[in-house]
Structures are given as C-alpha cells and as structure tokens.
Amino acid sequence: MRDPQSHVMPAPAPRIEPMPVDSPLTGFRTLLYKEVLRFWKVSFQTVAAPVLNAVLYLVIFAHVLDRHVTVYGDVSYTAFLVPGLVMMSVLQNAFANSSSSLIQSKITGNIIFVLLPPLSYREFYAAYVIASTLRGLFVGAGVLLVSLPFVDLPIANPLWVLVFALMGGAILGSFGVIAGIWAEKFDQLAAFQNFFIMPLTMLSGVFYSIHSLPQIWQNVSHFNPFFFMIDGFRYGFFGQSDTSPWLSLGVVVTCFVVLAVLTLTMLGRGYKLRS
Amino acid sequence: MSTAAIRIQAVTKSYGALKALGGVDLEIAQGEFFGLLGPNGAGKTTLISSLAGIVRPDGGSLEVMGHNVVSDYRNARRNLGVVPQELVFDPFFSVRELLRIQSGYFGIRSNDDWIDEILASLDLTGKANANMRALSGGMKRRVLVAQALVHRPPVIVLDEPTAGVDVELRQGLWHFIRKLNRDGHTIVLTTHYLEEAEALCGRIAMLKSGRIVALDTTENLLRRFATHSLRVRLQQPEVGLALGGAAAEEGGWIEFGFDSYQDVESLLARLREANAGLVEMQLGAPDLERVFVEVMNRA
C-alpha cells in the first residue's frame, strides 16, 4: 500500500495561485442571485400560493363588507383593502424568504458553503435582505395585478408606495435573518412567525382603519410598527391615511436602522454561525 | 524561504470546560501531503474549522499562504479549499449550478473550463445537470470535493473524505488528490483509515485532547515508534512464551517484537536450541496503526 515516493519531503512544487477575482462584488452578486434563484425555482409555492391566499382574502372580505363600509369618506372598502393585502403579502413573504432559507441551510448543513468563501458579513446581510425584499415585491406585485380587475385603485403618490414597499420588505427580511439565525428547529421558527409576525401583521390595520376601533385600541396600534408600514403604504395610494405619513416614514426608517444594526452585529459576531 | 502553506501558532479553543485545542503549533510547507490524525474528539475538526474561519479561536493565530485567517480573511479563504466531513448539499440546484455558484462566491464569474475539468477528473461529467438529490452518496461526496476546488486553491483540506465511501471511489479519489499534490497543491488530510495516511502522507501530526503529541515524517514515525514483529506457531508454545513472546488472541500465535531484521536470526536460533518446533511463521513490518496506538497510549 505504501508509496515510497510520497514519503520524501516535497520537492519544490510549482507555486499554485488561486484564480483571480473578476470583481469585488461578484461574491455578493452570486449570493444574491442564488437566493433569488432559490425561491424562483419553487415559485409556485413561494409566489403563486401567497398571491392566491391574498386574493381569497380579497374576494371574501370585499364580498361581505364592500356595501357596508367606506373609509376616508368616499373610498370603497375593497379599494381600501387592496393596499393592505399587498403590503401584508410583501411583509410576510420577505420574512419567510430569509428565515426559511437560513434555517434550511443550517439544519441541512449546507450553510457551510456560504461561510467558507471570502464573503463579508455585510455582503451576507445585504444579499439575504435584498433577495427577501425582491420576493416580497414579486408577491405584492402579483396581488396588486390580480386585484386590479376587482377595483378601481388610484395611486396618488407612487414614490411613497415604492419607498414603503422597499422599507417593509427590508425590515421583514432583516427580521427573517434574525429569526433564521436564532432558531435551531423549524418549530422555533414557526413560533416566531405565528406568535410574533402574524399577530402584528393582522392587527396592523390591513383589514380596517384604526379609526373604527375604540380609542384605547387606536392607541395600542401606535405601538405596532407594522401599522405604520401599512398606513404609509396606503397613503401612497389614496393620499390619505390614519396617521401622518411622515410619522410613518420616521417609524419605518427607525425600525429598519435598528434591525439592520442588530442583524449586522449578530452576523459580525458570528452568532450561532461561527462558534 | 517560501511562505508556509499553513502556519498555526499557539491556537487555543475551549467550549465551556472542554478544552478543544490546548495551544497548537504547526507549520506545513507548500507542496506537502500532510496527515492530521487523532481519535474522535482530539480536536482535528476544530483545528480545520479554525483555519477555515468557521470556528473562532480563543487565542493564537492561523495563516494560510501567509494570510491571517481573521485580519486578512478574504485572501486566506481564497487560498483554502475545504472538503467538509458531513455529506451536505443544497437540494435546489444541479451539480453545475452549484459549482458555478460556489465559483461566484469566490469572485470568479466565468469558470466553466475549470469546472468541466474538475467534473471530468471526478467522473461527474455525466451528472453535471442532475439535481443533487438524484445523486448517490459517493457522487455527492465527489461534488463536495469539486466544490472545494472551484477556485483552484493552493491549499486543500480534506476532513475525513473517504468515511463511508466504497473502495473503488476511494481509490479514484486518492488518484485525483495525488495528482493535485503533484501539480503543487498542498494537501491536508484527516482520516481514520491509517493505512491511507501511511500510503499518502509525507508528514503526520497526531492530536490527542487538543494537543499535538507526535509530529514527524511518516518514515521517522514508523522508525521511532513501531517495531518489526515475528509471529510464530510452535509445537511447544510454552517455550516461545518463556523466551519472551506474547500470546496472540487467536490461532495459537506467539508474537515477538524486535527493532531490526538482524534480530530475527538470533531469535530463530534460540527457538531451535530450545526445541520449540517451528510450525508456521509470519514477518510483520511496522505500520502506522501500531505507531498510532503507541503514541496515544504514551501521551
């Protein structure tokens, strides 16, 4: 079995150089591409199914409530509901994307293929959050497109629509990174989703204006950052909202900055990724 | 003097009360085929993971091709390819997609020529477009090797690459790894198959409880620690035992240890003089397994 030639100290070997880097951004772009490709390959589950869910909400709630409720004076309930459903879809799917990708990679062990290459923790964060935001936007755009035949929807301030959609996606994408890194089992992630994300989303004014609530619940709603994401997004469509859009923008930007710093700190310290 | 492929200085790592690495110093020259051996829990994987940046040591420093794995991690990782111990894969992608993605992580966008070469060398060309889920365990293991090589790293670390792998694949894999070593790649191997380490590695370090307890060329280790052996079956076994032989567990064999073949003649002469009645005889060369057991017992 022994190979005598392998037992001598090595002769001067030709020096091997690693392959040259095409661009400093190639690593980040590839991770982003891979994260987008990951959800796109199963888009029936990751895009089409959430669109169908949102449309079912629309059909049922609009059918039951459209003739009984108007909001902001003359806005029909169906028109009011659509931006809420769009934003809810953006938020839930942005969270689902980064959290599920990370927990799957951790549990199957293939996270090592992202940890071994020369990617910085900032590139890691940016790739996961942008991919999550893109999935949120894809689903949100799908919900909006499918809803249009049902309702005449104005877009008063498109820039506000875009800013809140992007910020909402980025916030929930960051939440997803935190949850995906923290959770060690699928049921821990499900608990995070069911006991934290879902209640905050459903109690954020997706289905109602908070002015229809008793004063105490209106006050409580102001502690829910999801309310500001949805209210600011809705302002982009109707030019009207439950609270000042500038306040909503301030809350949303603050939330994003806090979560980004928290997530980057976790990643920079290698929390639960690099022991 | 050329830069060391790997330089490890006073590296320590503890997990609570457990000291996984207790001050490891090690230098591996470029072009070496180096073996890292030790029982389970000795610290081999912790050491490799520290080198790869997966584990953060409590103290000490590690360099790959002169690049510190913490302060200059990008260059250190570009110079290192690691084949992990666990059979892990991403089920969403085909083999070629995975290799392209892995290349991209290392900053290389157009890498199909080298990917094709690796696929051919590892006999995976026919499976390039197959999803990872459709591959056998042996093929998945080869894809892991391919993933570690996509950026053509000068230093390649293989952590138990042949665990649970059939003989044919193991031979093919070693043939390929030997070729990489001849081409100039530094190879670091951990394995529990000691005959593999003996056949392949020019130098070996043995770890126990997070410390290096032996470090030398394979030849020197075999010379220093292992003895030759003579196994005999005798008509009068008690005579052999009286002459210092040890009874083997099976088959009525009696085993004698000695340092060089010159000692065989005098041993046989003494057996003949005592009328022991030689029935059968086997001569054993020193092997790494004996060295390993002896080193671990002494440490």
Image (cartoon, rainbow, N blue to C red):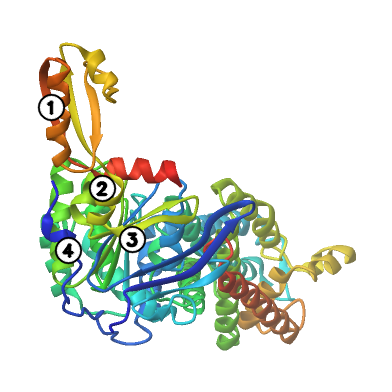
The residue lying furthest to the top in this view is: B235
The lab-note entry on whether marks 2 and 4 share a chain reads no
A162 left or right of B94?
A: right
User: N-terminal of the two: label 1 or label 2?
Assistant: 2
**Disc ID at residue B160:** none
Q: Residues within 10 Å of mark 2 (few under 14, many from 20)?
A: many
Please name which of the two marks, 3 or 2, marks the residue nearer to the observer: 2
Q: What residue does disc 1 label?
A: B269
Who is closer to the viewer here, B125 or B37?
Answer: B37
- Compared with A122, B211 (above or below) is above
User: Looking at the image, do the residues carrying marks 3 and 4 touch, with CB atoms under 8 Å apart?
Assistant: no
N-terminal of the pair, mark 3 or mark 4, is 4
Q: Name the side, left or right, on which B99 lies relative to A132.
A: left
Tags 3 and 2 on a common chain: no
Q: Position of residue B29 (x, y in %)?
A: 29, 72
The amino acid on which the numbered mark 1 sits, given as a three-letter code, is Ala
Of residue B243 and residue A248, the one placed in the foreground of this image is B243
Q: Quadrant of residue A30?
A: bottom left
Circles 1 and 4 on the same subunit: no
Q: Is residue B132 visible?
A: yes
Q: Which mark is residue A41?
A: 3
Q: Tell me the chain of label 2.
A: B
Name the amino acid, label 3.
Answer: Lys
Q: Find residue A8 and name its label.
A: 4
Most foreground residue, A85 or A167: A167
- Residue at the right extreme, as displayed: A216
Mark 3 or mark 4, whichever is nearer to me: 4
Q: CA distance from mark 1 to mark 4?
A: 36 Å
The type of residue carrying mark 2 is Thr
